[in-house]
């Protein structure tokens, strides 16, 4: 089923949309590299319990006597801490691989949910206009002016500590960004001819919204979206820095960095440096994939 | 236009009211300010006295009613911690934050727009790829970490810039500003850059995306076909079109920087509003939190209004009055 | 130039630089403290950073030295002339910063002001409450009449900063904060105050006591630990307090930096749930399958002792605190007059702990959650994780939850937790922790307001009751020591360690480390050469 938006000249070859998508995506070697790296990271995260030398979440496996060991030291349990240990004697390598899991869940999870909620509301606001628009946009105002830390504290007070509660806090904070961005673009788009044409055909609203309006709002949405995944991970780090992040015994990359932050001046660089590198690689790979996705999915960039 | 503005102002009042209510309930749920503020060796009698002194012995709805009554007379309450009017405290700290936020935004635009334009015009160029890869760095590392790295490199090892604090200030309009003195600017540099990093990346990416897309549009192709100079095409036709997303996002970013440069202000010991709000939240200084957030929500509403107005000026396709009503 | 000559020239030039630097530096010093000062009103908010600054500007009748021993301040001497009457002889020829003379009237005014500071979130009223009547005998003699004998009167007076009746008659907290009313008799006067940022002081050249070393002091607030250390290393500030333990090793090796340190008066300990009776569930304790246990094991002293000796205090001090603490078995450190002789830090004995658990009927252990703050005490979140490791090794499977003080303290106050980490910054008299933490919660007496585990022991209460009205100091101290000994043997709380207070400074400075943690400008001086 071809989209109304795609210019006719591109549809001359016979191919499925998926195959076209894949071949266009693969045009960029860098993006492909990013995808490979991301898949490796995702696999590491999924199979963490089977590949790490230590379960960094089990207090019984940690020993403070192994704390702050330099990379390459052999610890009390007999294996080598390739990337050193943190203050609790947590093997940094194991911590990072487990931390990837938490960070991906928190970052991608919150960004996805926030994107779904935010983009839908933004589209609706732009398309419906009037009172609906006012209500949604004032909600956005309210949300944007609400400090993350206060939202996180309230969730901590209501729901207690936990990874899912951090996701909820981040969603609560982030959806407004998507809503605002999507509405901005959609306001312009809905005046265009193709929407009027669709309206003339008396297509149902949800169809116009999601089949016609949304694809054309995608480019800025993906720009914001891929950045927001990164931002959510960094924001979670900041929440951890403020003591409001994930539980301390189940550190995310952000919490590992925040933990090691205090040791930066003392030369024990590995405690926050390696999680930082892991975070960087993860985010770069997500963004390389995201950038290419954005270009491929953008109906107006078609050659 | 007038009807439109009046309606927006009425909505704003409702939002402010909602905000104050949410904060009241939220703070109540989080904890008891007296538990946090009181000296640990205070006995029960002293604790009860403090609860009474701060008006926390009344039921919550009565506390809120008292607050509303006073707010209508222009009194947003006194800080539990400083025993000064909440509004006065906020206004005292505002210049420090405003200059930092504007400094950061200006840095972001000066660096971000040209780089984004370049990357958009030559998407396949080597330098463009470097720009894009570099821009990822701007938002992938947590602010507090980058802030400390800046301090370590530029203050501790190189000794080029002062590590923390606000430095000398000059007076303008009866307020203290750092950007009026050389020492103040030196103190401002690192925190402003720290805040700007994320924004630079954002501007680069938005600009690049906008440019790439616009270059392929019919009117740009037409303008080029007409033989207009590439510079004119870029700066008049393309630039105008990409400003919409940039203005939206930068406007919002400016808002959230003014409101919540919490981490940067903490790391650089910058005595602004962000520092005030986090300190107030930590001790549940409700009058300050409420007054602050009411002000911030007004600011966001104003920014959004301005953004909407700018839309309609930049792009006649957007009309202010939605026909949906 | 020969090597010798060059060395000589180098010595000469460094000596010269040293001299001139010292000359310039003796004029002013820039200090940075971790905790923000919220008010310059000495009676508005009882908070350590505020008290430290108040001690710079104001004086008390009874001052304290670096070890918290009482010293004559604005009072030269004091004694109980009758069981219910204390008499203070005041120091003559003392003037406030604005030239007003200090007399007994000012003391009377100050004590009347204490309970009457509007909106105070934590007032000093408790120190004037025992006083029923104030009697001015002559301008330099004042008597306080109390309802019952009150042996702690001098100690109370170490907390009350004296104001001037004339100047401060109607002074508001706002006027203090603006600096206009911040006028005392102390070694420094306030030049300016930028809330949350800095206070600038100028030496009071007419001070009655030792002249402060610097003409000018800039007292900055840098709350972020790493940033504070960085500011010291960069030379932007010359003196910092609360040196983070993570930076200690590096700073000790840095020859541009000197540290001053002393064992403090702050005990870090674990509070245990004594509220739920032996046959009820404690909220965060279950059996090994996560099912309710049906009883509260913490009511059994053997279990409490097992949990205590399962903790390797030395490891925590060495590894987590990086040496900036001493293991403890009681509230006060050695050398303080109410320290209990013979009560040593419980020795680390995991096997003994397992035996005790088995004896108490828990051979397989149980599960517990240990709660704690993550932004209050030095390394608080790290300590509870370390204890989680140690308890898990003796079969008490421990989960650990750290949260900000903001949400933690309310729940701790409601006794929501089974076990929690908390600290107590004591004054040097053992009655202080006894009354607030170990005594049975009794509103009428003002006891146990920080007894968050609801510990209760009639023998402790009885001794405390007697000691509070015992004017014979030797007998009183004996009672206080005995009560603390009983509580320690009963493992009312599990003491962990007493923190070491550490300040860092550039080499050209010296500092008298105080065990009460206060960072005062008058304690900083140029280093002797």
Image (cartoon, coloured by chain):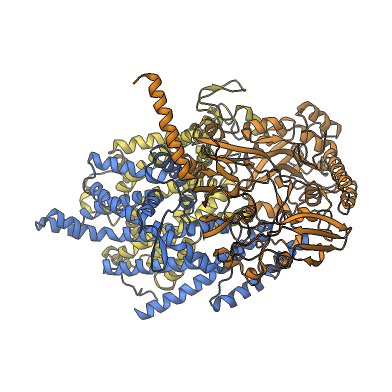
Chain colours: A yellow, B blue, C orange
> In the shown orientation, is residue A60 left or right of residue C23?
right
Is B7 or B49 nearer to us in this picture?
A: B49
Q: Residue furthest bottom?
A: B3
The number of numbered badges drawn on the structure is: 0
Whether residue C234 is visible: no
> In the shown orientation, is residue C218 left or right of residue B49?
left
Q: In the rendered image of this protein, does residue C42 appear above or below residue C334?
A: below
Q: Residue B224 appears at what percent x and percent y?
A: 13, 55
Whether residue B39 is visible: yes
Q: In the rendered image of this protein, does residue A77 appear above or below residue A8?
A: above
Residue at figure coordinates x 66%, y 51% from the top left? C408
Q: Residue C329 appears at what percent x and percent y?
A: 77, 36
Q: Residue C443 appears at what percent x and percent y?
A: 82, 60
Q: Residue furthest left?
A: B227
Q: Residue C437 appears at what percent x and percent y?
A: 78, 49
Is C372 or B179 nearer to us in this picture?
A: B179
Is C159 or B298 nearer to us in this picture?
A: C159
Q: Quadrant of residue C487?
A: top right
Is C89 or C520 nearer to us in this picture?
A: C89
> In the shown orientation, is residue C307 left or right of residue C462?
left
Q: Residue furthest front?
A: C93
Residue at figure coordinates x 32%, y 59% from the top left? B245
């Amino acid at each position: 089923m071809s989209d109304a938006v795609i210019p006719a000249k591109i549809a001359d070859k016979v191919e499925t949309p998926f195959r076209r998508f894949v071949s266009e995506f693969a045009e960029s070697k860098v993006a492909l590299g990013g995808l490979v790296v991301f898949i490796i990271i995702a696999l590491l995260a999924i199979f963490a319990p089977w590949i790490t030398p230590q379960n960094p979440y089990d207090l019984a496996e940690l020993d403070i006597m192994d704390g702050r060991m330099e990379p390459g030291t052999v610890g009390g349990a007999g294996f080598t801490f390739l990337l050193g240990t943190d203050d609790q004697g947590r093997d940094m390598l194991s911590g990072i691989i487990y931390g990837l899991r938490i960070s991906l869940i928190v970052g991608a999870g919150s960004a996805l949910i926030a994107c779904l909620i935010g983009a839908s509301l933004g589209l609706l606001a732009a398309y419906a206009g009037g009172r609906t628009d006012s209500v949604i946009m004032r909600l956005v105002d309210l949300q944007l002016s609400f400090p993350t830390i206060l939202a996180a504290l309230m969730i901590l007070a209501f729901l207690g500590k936990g990874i899912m509660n951090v996701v909820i806090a981040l969603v609560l904070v982030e959806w407004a960004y998507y809503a605002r961005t999507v509405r901005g673009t959609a306001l312009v788009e809905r005046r265009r001819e193709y929407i009027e044409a669709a309206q003339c055909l008396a297509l149902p609203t949800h169809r116009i919204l999601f089949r016609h309006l949304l694809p054309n709002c995608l480019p800025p949405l993906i720009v914001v979206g891929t950045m927001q995944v990164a931002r959510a991970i960094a924001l979670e780090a900041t929440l951890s820095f403020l003591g409001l992040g994930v539980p301390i015994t189940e550190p995310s990359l952000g919490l590992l960095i925040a933990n090691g932050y205090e040791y930066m001046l003392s030369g024990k660089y590995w405690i926050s440096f390696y999680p930082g590198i892991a975070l960087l690689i993860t985010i770069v790979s997500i963004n390389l994939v995201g950038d290419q996705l954005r270009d491929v999915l953008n109906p107006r960039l078609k050659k | 236009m007038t009807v439109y503005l009046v309606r927006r102002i009425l909505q704003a009042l409702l939002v402010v009211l909602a905000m104050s209510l949410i904060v009241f309930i939220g703070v109540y749920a989080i904890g008891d300010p007296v538990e946090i503020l009181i000296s640990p060796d205070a006995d029960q009698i002293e604790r009860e006295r403090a609860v009474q002194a701060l008006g926390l012995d009344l039921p919550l709805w009565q506390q809120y009613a008292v607050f509303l009554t006073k707010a209508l007379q222009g009194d947003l309450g006194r800080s539990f911690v400083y025993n000064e009017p909440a509004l006065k405290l906020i206004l005292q700290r505002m210049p420090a934050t405003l200059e930092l936020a504007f400094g950061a935004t200006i840095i972001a635009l000066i660096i971000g727009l040209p780089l984004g334009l370049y990357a958009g015009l030559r998407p396949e160029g080597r330098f463009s790829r470097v720009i894009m890869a570099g821009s990822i760095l701007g938002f992938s590392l947590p602010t507090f970490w980058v802030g400390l790295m800046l301090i370590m490199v530029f203050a501790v090892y190189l000794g080029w810039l002062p590590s923390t604090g606000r430095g000398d200030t000059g007076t303008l309009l009866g307020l203290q500003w750092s950007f009026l003195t050389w020492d103040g600017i030196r103190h401002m540099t690192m925190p402003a850059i720290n805040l700007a990093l994320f924004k630079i990346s954002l501007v680069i990416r938005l600009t690049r995306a906008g440019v790439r897309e616009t270059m392929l549009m019919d009117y740009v192709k037409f303008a080029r076909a007409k033989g207009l100079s590439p510079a004119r095409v870029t700066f008049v036709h393309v630039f105008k079109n990409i400003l919409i997303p940039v203005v939206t996002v930068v406007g919002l970013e400016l808002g959230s920087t003014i409101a919540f440069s919490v981490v940067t202000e903490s790391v650089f010991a910058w005595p602004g509003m962000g520092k005030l709000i986090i300190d107030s939240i930590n001790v549940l200084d409700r009058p300050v939190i409420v007054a602050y957030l009411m002000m911030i929500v007004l600011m966001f509403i104003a920014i959004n209004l301005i953004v909407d107005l700018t839309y309609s000026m930049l792009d006649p396709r957007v009309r202010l009055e939605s026909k949906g009503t | 130039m020969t090597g010798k000559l060059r060395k000589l020239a180098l010595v000469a030039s460094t000596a010269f630089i040293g001299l001139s630097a010292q000359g310039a530096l003796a004029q002013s010093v820039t200090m940075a403290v971790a905790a923000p000062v919220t008010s310059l009103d000495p009676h508005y908010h009882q908070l350590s950073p505020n008290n430290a600054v108040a001690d710079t500007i104001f004086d008390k009748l009874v001052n304290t030295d670096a070890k918290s021993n009482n010293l004559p301040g604005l009072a030269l001497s004091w004694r109980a002339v009758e069981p219910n009457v204390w008499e203070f002889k005041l120091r003559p020829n003392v003037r406030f910063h604005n030239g007003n003379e200090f007399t007994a009237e000012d003391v009377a005014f100050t004590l009347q002001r204490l309970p009457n500071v509007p909106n105070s979130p934590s007032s000093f009223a408790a120190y004037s409450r025992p006083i029923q009547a104030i009697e001015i005998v002559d301008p330099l003699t004042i008597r306080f009449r109390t309802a019952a004998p009150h042996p702690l009167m001098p100690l109370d007076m170490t907390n009350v900063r004296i104001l001037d009746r004339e100047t401060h008659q109607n002074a508001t907290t706002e006027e203090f904060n603006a600096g206009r009313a911040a006028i005392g008799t102390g070694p420094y006067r306030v030049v300016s105050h930028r809330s949350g940022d800095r206070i600038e002081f100028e030496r009071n050249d007419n001070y009655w006591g030792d002249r402060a070393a610097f003409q000018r002091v800039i007292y900055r607030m840098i709350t972020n630990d790493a940033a504070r250390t960085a500011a010291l290393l960069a030379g932007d500030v010359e003196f910092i307090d609360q040196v983070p333990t993570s930076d200690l090793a590096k700073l000790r090796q840095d020859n541009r930096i000197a540290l001053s340190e002393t064992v403090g008066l702050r005990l870090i300990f674990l509070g245990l749930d004594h509220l739920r009776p032996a046959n009820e569930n404690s909220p965060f304790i279950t059996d090994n399958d996560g099912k309710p246990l049906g009883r509260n094991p913490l009511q059994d002293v053997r279990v409490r002792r097992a949990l205590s000796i399962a903790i390797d205090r030395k490891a925590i001090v060495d590894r987590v605190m990086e040496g900036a603490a001493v293991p403890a078995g009681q509230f006060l450190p050695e050398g303080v007059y109410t320290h209990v002789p013979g009560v040593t830090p419980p020795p680390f004995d995991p096997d003994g702990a397992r035996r005790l658990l088995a004896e108490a009927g828990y051979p397989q252990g149980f599960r517990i959650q240990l709660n704690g703050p993550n932004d209050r005490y030095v390394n608080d979140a790290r300590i509870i994780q370390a204890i989680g490791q140690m308890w898990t090794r003796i079969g008490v499977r421990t989960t650990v939850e750290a949260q900000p003080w903001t949400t933690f303290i309310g729940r701790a106050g409601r006794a929501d937790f089974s076990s929690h980490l908390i600290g107590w910054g004591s004054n040097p008299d053992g009655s202080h922790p006894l009354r607030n933490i170990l005594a049975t919660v009794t509103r009428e007496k003002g006891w146990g307001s920080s007894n968050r585990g609801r510990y209760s022991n009639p023998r402790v209460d009885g001794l405390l009751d007697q000691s509070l009205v015992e004017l014979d100091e030797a007998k009183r101290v004996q009672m206080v020591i005995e009560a603390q000994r009983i509580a320690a043997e009963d493992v009312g709380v599990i003491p962990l360690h007493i923190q070491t207070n550490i300040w860092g400074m550039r080499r050209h400075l010296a500092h008298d480390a105080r065990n009460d943690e206060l960072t005062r400008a008058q304690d900083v001086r140029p280093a002797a050469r």
